[in-house]
Image (spheres, grey):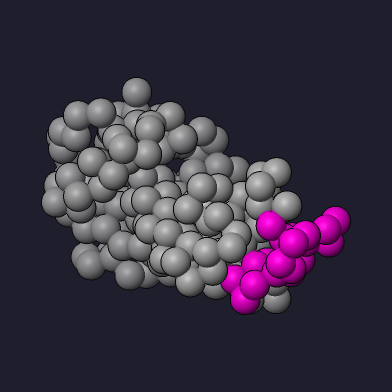
Amino acid sequence: MPDQSLEQAAREAGHVLVCGCDEAGAGPLAGRVYAAAVILPEGADIPGLDDSKKLTGKKREALFPVIQEKAAAWAVAYVEAEEIDAIDILNARMKAMQLAMDALSPQADFALIDGNRDHGSRYAITAPHRCVIKGDSLSASIAAASILAKVSRDHYMLEMAALYPQYGFEQHKGYGTALHYQRLREYGPCPIHRRTFLKNL
C-alpha cells in the first residue's frame, strides 16, 4: 500500500511542501489527457487509498471527495486532444502534469512524479522533482493524484458520451476497445478523437 515514506524523505532533505503528480488517459484514442497534483498533510489518513488502477470505479468515486477534503492542496489540469495531436502524447503528459503543479495553492517546492519520464521534446517538468517508477503504488500523494486525474477524466468522458452518443464513450472512456473501433468504422472520428492515434483505422 502506498505510504508517505517518499514524502517524508523529501521533507527530511529540506523540502517543506511535497506533492505527488500523476496523469490519466495517455492511451485512449479520444479525449483529453488529465493530470493531478496533490499535497497531503504529514500523517494524513485516507483509508483505502491506492493506485487508481487497482481500485473499482465506485471506490475511486468514493475517495475523490475525501482526497480533496484532506489534501493541503490539490489541482487538476488537462491537455485537449487537438493539442495532443500537435505536440504528441509524451509532451502533452508533461505539460498537463506541470500545469497541475503550477495550479497548486500553496505551491509545492518538490514533486514526486509517477513513472520514469520527466520531459518530452518540447515540454518538461520544470519543478524540482524525482521520478518514481510505480509511484502510484508507493507514494500516498501520487496515489491520491492518480485518483483525482482518473475520476476527473472519467467525468469528462461521460460528458462527451452525452455529446457524441454513437461512440459508447460511457463504456470504454475512449480506449481502443472492439466496440470503439467498430463505432469508429461506422461513424468516423468526432472532434475529440486523437487523429494521430487513428493511423491504423
| Residue 138 visible in the shown view | yes
Q: Quadrant of residue 193?
A: bottom right
Q: Total label count?
A: 0
Say which of 152 and 161 sits in front: 161
Q: Is residue 173 above or below residue 83?
A: above
Magenta region includes residue 184: yes
User: Residue shown at 16%/37% (left/top)?
Assistant: 44
In this rendering, is residue 125 above or below 4? below
User: Residue at coordinates 25% horizontally, 28% vertically from top-left?
Assistant: 48
For this orientation, the residue located farthest to the right is 200
Q: Residue 159: image x %, image y %?
A: 41, 66
Residue at (21, 65) in percent of width and height: 106
- Please name whichever residue, 66 or 39, is drawn nearer the observer in this view of the structure: 66
User: What x and y, as percent, mark residue 180?
Assistant: 66, 52
Left or right of 9: which side holds 196? Answer: right
What span is colored magenta in the figure? Answer: 183-201
Q: Residue at x 30, y 29 (%)?
A: 3
Q: Quadrant of the C terminus?
A: bottom right
Q: Quadrant of the N terminus?
A: top left
Name the residue at the top extreme: 1
Q: Is residue 15 visible?
A: no
Relative placement, left or right, of 74 versus 88 is: left
- Residue 14: horizontal and vertical position, in percent? 28, 47
Percent from the top left, x then y, of residue 136? Answer: 43, 36
Q: Is residue 103 above or below residue 58?
A: below
Classify residue 61 as left or right of residue 131. left
Magenta segment includes 26: no
